[in-house]
Image (cartoon, grey):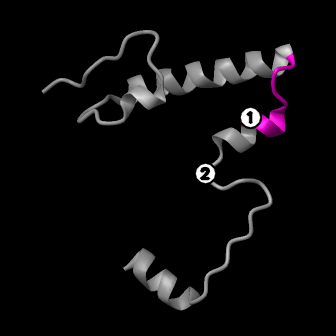
Amino acid sequence: MQPRTLDTDASFADVVGMSRISFSEIDRLHRKERAKDRKRIASGKATPQQVQDENSLIPYGAKIKFTNFRSFLKETYS
């Protein structure tokens, strides 16, 4: 089964639900998203910090507390 190719207007949101996608397709989409981010920053529509916050899994300044760090490590790395 060949990986599916997305059209040129696809975004990462379009990848959700796809059973297979090639690394080159993911890389192309990532580059496209970063180009959009650079344009937004250059035009003044967003600051670098805003773009970073939007793209980050964990927001800047977020505090993460592990109530049982030993248990967390065991579950994560076992």
Q: Quadrant of residue 60?
A: bottom right
* Residue found at the very far top of the displayed protein: 8
Please tell me which residue is depicted at 48% across the width and 23% down the height of the picture.
11
Question: What stretch of residues is rendered in magenta?
Answer: 44-51
| Numbered marks: total | 2
Residue 46: x and y in percent read 81, 27
The answer to whether residue 45 is above or below residue 53 is above
List the residue tagged with mark 2: 57
The percent coordinates of residue 23 (x first, y second) are 38, 31
Q: Secondary structure at mark 1?
A: helix
> In the shown orientation, is residue 9 left or right of residue 17?
right
Q: Indicate which disc, 1 or 2, sits on the residue closer to the N terminus.
A: 1
Residue drawn at (74%, 21%) of the image:
38
Assign the N terminus to one quadrant of the image: top left
Q: Residue at x 23, y 36 (%)?
A: 19
Q: In x, y percent, where is residue 37? A: 70, 24
Amino acid type of the residue that numbered disc 1 sits on in the rendered structure: Val
SS type, badge 2: loop
Is residue 62 a member of the stretch shown in magenta? no
| Residue at x 76%, y 19% (from the top left corner) | 40
Relative to residue 62, is residue 4 drawn left or right?
left
Q: Which mark is residue 51?
A: 1
Q: Nearer the viewer, residue 22 or 61?
A: 61
On-image quarter of the C terminus: bottom left
